[in-house]
């Protein structure tokens, strides 16, 4: 019996190639609120790039370290000078 032709032979599946991990940059706005933004996209208006970039986990670790007060800057300023804080119901 003849050997099967190469086209008839079972195809060996190649191992899936790991996708490269996306990289981000840390950005901050004028209210000192932090976020991450893909390196492949332009930083949106109102946000400024910091010098921290890399894998998502590195960027989020940096934000967790430096963003210790989640209040916007304007609220922190108002409460620092004794302005009453309006609470919603």
Image (cartoon, rainbow, N blue to C red):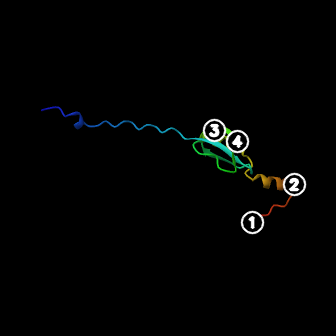
Q: Are marks 2 and 3 in contact (CB under 8 Å)?
A: no
Lower position in the chain sequence, tag 2 or tag 4: 4
Image point 81% across, 61% down: which residue? 85
Label 4 near label 2: C-beta < 8 Å?
no
Instruction: Name the residue nearer the viewer: 27 or 1.
Output: 27
Using the image, determine if residue 36 lies above or below residue 81: above
Q: What is the residue that sits farthest to the right in this orientation?
A: 81
For label 4, count other residues whose C-alpha is less than 10 Å away and answer few (under 14), some (14-19) or many (20+). few
Instruction: Give the distance between the C-alpha atoms of the residues marked 4 and 3, in whole angstroms.
Output: 15 Å
Q: Which residue is mark 3?
A: 53
Task: Report x, y in % for residue 71.
Answer: 75, 53
For marks 2 and 1, the one nearer the N-term is: 2
Contact (Cβ within 8 Å) of mark 2 with mark 1: no
Q: CA distance from mark 2 to mark 3?
A: 35 Å
Residue that numbered label 2 is attached to? 81
Return the residue at label 4.
Answer: 65
């Amino acid at each position: 019996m003849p050997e099967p032709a190469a086209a008839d032979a079972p195809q060996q599946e190649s191992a899936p190639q790991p996708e490269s991990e996306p990289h981000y940059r840390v950005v901050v706005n004028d209210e000192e609120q932090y976020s991450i933004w893909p390196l492949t996209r332009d930083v949106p208006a109102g946000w400024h790039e910091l010098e921290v970039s890399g894998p998502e986990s590195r960027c989020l670790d940096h934000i967790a370290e430096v963003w210790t007060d989640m209040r916007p800057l304007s609220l922190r300023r108002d409460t620092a000078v004794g302005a009453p804080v309006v609470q919603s119901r």
